[in-house]
Image: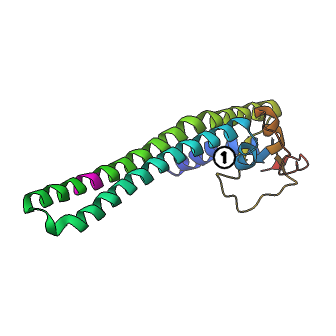
Amino acid sequence: MLKKIALAIALFALPLVGISAQTVKLGYYNTQAVIVDMPEFVKAQNELKELGNKFQAEMKRTETEFNTKYQQFIQQKDSLPQAIAERRQKELEEMGQRSQQYQQDAQQSMQDQQEKKLTPIYQKIEAAVKAIGQEGGFTCIFDLARTQLPYVNETQMVDLTSKIKSRVGATGNASATPAPAAGKKK
């Protein structure tokens, strides 16, 4: 049994010995710094804002219509026959339910449109990261916007934000400056 454990440890440790002798090249970037300068992101944001404004306008219109009918009902309630008052009250309840359903549908539609418009942009960034990683011989590239690294030694990692911006056609200045490239021993 002891021999099996020793053999398992040796088999596990052998690849680690090989890795520790190799230089590990690490890089990092920030998706948010890249994406805000991409023309397609700016276009998507504008389209989403416009769609959101249309939904807001429709919700405001239905709210105004509901409030008007509600105020009329309150003013006339005492002078209406009970059957008519009950029917109008039911109409108001249905109108309120439709308004709530519309708000939920609008929110879902906004989420769907956001995903539809932003997914290709994130895919473009990921493709650029993979290409740069392969071309540059990187072992690993971290996205600081998605992964909270407690410490980044910029002298032993390469900031690839500007390269990725260039690859995806982002305009504007890079928000981070490239760190000197250096290998990190593990």
Mark 1 surroundings within 10 Å by alpha-carbon count, few (fewer than 14), some (14 through 19), many (20 or more): few
Task: Give whichever of 160, 48 is nearer the camera.
Answer: 48
Q: Residue at x 88, y 50 (%)?
A: 177
Which residue corresponds to mark 1? Answer: 13
Q: Residue at x 51, y 44 (%)?
A: 54
Look at the picture and state if 50 lies above or below 80.
above
State which quadrant residue 118 falls in.
top right
At label 1, the amino acid type is Ala
Look at the picture and state if 5 lies above or below 122.
below
Q: Which residues are magenta?
A: 93-97
Q: Mostly what secondary structure, the magenta segment?
A: helix
Q: Is residue 11 left or right of residue 160?
A: left
Horizontal and vertical percent position of residue 86: 13, 59
What secondary structure is found at the residue carrying circle 1?
Answer: helix
Horizontal and vertical percent position of residue 134: 76, 31
Q: Residue at x 76, y 47 (%)?
A: 28
Q: Residue at x 64, y 42 (%)?
A: 46
Horizontal and vertical percent position of residue 156: 85, 52
Task: Give whichever of 140, 168 is nearer the camera.
Answer: 168
Q: Is residue 102 left or right of residue 137?
A: left
Task: Give whichever of 142, 127 is nearer the camera.
Answer: 127
Q: Is residue 55 magenta?
A: no
Q: Is residue 95 magenta?
A: yes
* Residue farthest to the front, as pictured: 79
Task: Give whichever of 72, 9 is nearer the camera.
Answer: 72
How many circles with numbers are drawn on the protein?
A: 1
Can residue 92 be seen in this snapshot? yes
Can residue 160 be seen in this snapshot? no
